[in-house]
Image (tube, rainbow, N blue to C red):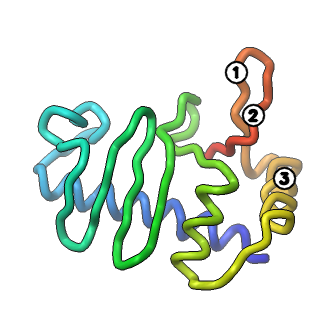
Amino acid sequence: MEISIYLLDYENFIIKFENALKEKYQIKDDIYEYIGTIVKKKDSFDNYQYNFHGAGCKITFNNIVCEYDFSLDENSKYQFSLWKLKTFIESFYQNKVEDVELRKSLEDLVLKNLLKKLIIEEKVFDIYLLY
């Protein structure tokens, strides 16, 4: 499994969306400061449909679905679950990914310190941080 490529495409998809949003609303800094004020919580533009919810966002673009959460960790920007990444991979590449194989690939990256898991008050969650 090409997990590094999947993660890079996932992150680049989010960044491309955020840059398009910045351009649409003429924002130079962090878009998250403007959600619900200048940036609508739910809208569509340039084939993007998006919905900011709680601590995250769901984006649909040309049948590609991407969900992510804003990271609580100061060293990373995005966090995701196995399900969120799987949904993205399957819609982006239009091929099926097995949960077990995807989880193993993610856990291998964690063991190599190339990916972090979310830890809150010493509890480790099955949420991964991109940094």
Compared with 28, 89 (above or below) is below
Left or right, 31 with reference to 65 = left
Residue at the spot x=13%, y=57% of the render?
24
Q: Name the foreground residue: 101 vs 114.
A: 101
Relative image position of residue 88 (x, y in whole percent): 55, 67
Tag of residue 125: 2
Q: Are marks 1 and 2 in contact (CB under 8 Å)?
A: yes
Residue with the mark numbered 1: 120
Residue at the spot x=64%, y=73% of the render?
5
Mark 3–mark 1 distance (CA, rounded to whole Å): 18 Å
Compared with 32, 51 (above or below) is below
* Three-letter amino acid code at the position of disc 1: Ile
Relative image position of residue 27 (x, y in whole percent): 16, 45
Q: Earlier in the sequence, mark 2 or mark 3?
A: 3
Relative image position of residue 59 (x, y in whole percent): 38, 59
Please state, as top left, top right, bottom left or bottom right, where the N terminus lies in the image: bottom right
Image quadrant of residue 101? bottom right
Q: Name the foreground residue: 124 vs 20.
A: 124
Residue with the mark numbered 3: 107
* Three-letter amino acid code at the position of disc 3: Glu
Mark 2–mark 3 distance (CA, rounded to whole Å): 12 Å
